Structure formats: C-alpha cells, structure tokens
Image: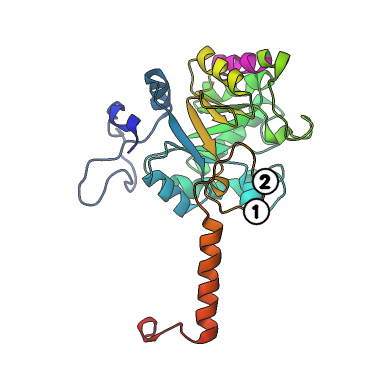
Amino acid sequence: MTSGSTHMSTEETPPYGSGASTSSTASGAAPIKRIRTHHLREMKQRGEKFAMLTAYEQYAAQTFDEAGIEVLLVGDSASNNVFGNETSLPVTVDELIPLVRAVTRSARRALVVADLPFGSYQASPEQAYLTAVRFMKEANAHAVKLEGGVEMAPQVRKLTEGGIPVMAHIGFTPQSEHNLGGYRVQGRGDAAAKVVAEARAMEESGAFAVVMEMVPGAVAAEVTTAVSIPTIGIGAGVECDGQVLVWQDAFGLRTGRMPRFVKQYADLHGVLLQAARDYAADVKAGTFPTPDHTF
C-alpha cells in the first residue's frame, strides 16, 4: 500500500447490506479501505503525493489497484487507446459505460473516475447531470470528470449538488483541441491568471479535485497553493498534489513519438511482440502443443 493508506479514517460497514463483497478476502483478512474523495484532500493537507492512471478493462485495473494506485481514470482517451480513433472526440457514452463497469468491478481499493465524453455535458447542467447519472447507476462509477473552466461552473455545481463527485480538468483540454488550435501549452504569460481563476471557480463550484494538463510548472504550483482541493498534473510539473498518465504511454504498450511529459517505465510492446513471435514460431515448428498441453 502507498504511504497515505495507513492514515485513512475508519469507514463503517454500509448499514443497509450489500451484494457480494469485494472488500475483503475469503480468508477473513481485514477489509481493504476504499479510497474516497476526502482521502485525497487529506493527503494534500499532509503533503503526500498520489498517483492516478488510466484503466479501461479488468486486468489493468486489478494490476494497478494491487500496485497501490490511488485513482483510476476511465478516460475518454479510450477513444484513441482502445477503439482506434485518432482523437478522443468520437467516443460515446454507450462505448465508455462498459469499460467503466469493468474497472469498477475489478478495483477493490482505488477511486474510479469516469470521463464524460465530448458532447455529453456541454449543452447544459441538466444534460451533464443526466449523463453523469448513467455512469453512476449503470457503471457504478465513484466520480466523474469533465473538461472546462469557468464556463463549466454551472455543470459542476449541478452535479455536486445532486450527489455526484466531480473532478475538473483545466489547462489544455483535449476535447477542445480544435478550438485551442491544437496541442498547445496553456497558461503562459498573461494567461496564467486565467488558469488560477478557473481552478478557483472549479473549487467554488464543488469539484473535489482538478486536473491541469500542459500548464507551465510555475503556474501549476501557484494553483496548487491557491486552492484547497488536490491538483493532478499531466505535463504540469512536480508541485501538483498528484500525477496522471495514460497507462499505454507510461508502460510502453503504445509506440512512436510520446508527449514530452511522458516517462516510460516499461516496454510492454516489445515484450508482447517477442512473446507473439515465439508463439508463432512454436506453432509453425510443431513444438507447441506438446503432450503436456494435450488432453
């Protein structure tokens, strides 16, 4: 477990019963405490960092959960990391809900956040609420994430007042890439004040955390001290309270040019490629299956 886990407050057993338990082992071990939004705020107050990764299916979710990753994001990045699209824009609510459901079924400890895809919340607070309710009811999401600054304050307020935790996302917002002129750093020079104002607006509207993407490190540091809610950086420097990466980028399943903010911790593409080649060679040579693999 990570450093913050030993400090989390005791959580009572749900008073109304529940279905099959996923919070304790069959051997009767102590139940695993679920990360909640207030735990992230407590970690910020103690100066403890936390990690967030994307996850889109069962085995990645289980593995990252076992590793102690505090937050799993079922991102709209599934559009270009699962469904083969060029950007995050085409993915739909109906495509994302089964992925969120798979992750929430598989993660026993991590907080699972579902991305609201492009076009599913921008029209009005009511549209945002109805979309978020689908993720909470049909996929058992623990929270949702939406992109935008001051203009999204009514949506954030509507969701949080309706009992849905919201993670905000400011700075570079991929769903607005065409409006922003492509993948460009946000908040340089005179625009820094706008990033700070957006973070404060999200906090005042009820967001429990705010992602800052491709924001200068000094600006992200200013935001982190200006708001009481946790900040999560992606290309925003080390002063953020947490960090997030797309797992296929971080662990080398995706190949090619990577964004500057990506650090690769493994070469999973290379491992899988060699394994597939070895399997194919065994089949062609008649060395698989052997008697040990035959009934």
Q: Are marks 2 and 1 in contact (CB under 8 Å)?
A: yes
Q: Which residues are magenta?
A: 194-204
* Badge nearest the viewer, 2 or 1: 1
- Label 2 sits on residue: 91
Q: What's the residue type where badge 1 is placed?
A: Phe
Quadrant including the C terminus: bottom left
Residue 214 placement: quadrant: top right
Alpha carbon separation for disc pair 2 and 1: 8 Å
> Does residue 229 appear to the left or right of 127 in the view shown?
left
Query: Residue visible at 52% across and 63% down?
Result: 272
Residue 111 placement: quadrant: top left
Query: Residue visible at 46% across and 35% down?
Result: 51
Instruction: Judge whether 64 appears above or below 236 on screen.
Output: below
What secondary structure is the stretch in magenta mostly built from? helix
Mark 2 or mark 1: whose residue is earlier in sequence: 1
- Residue 194, position as x, y percentages in the image: 68, 15
Q: Is residue 202 magenta?
A: yes
Instruction: Judge whether 71 appears above or below 125 on screen.
Output: below
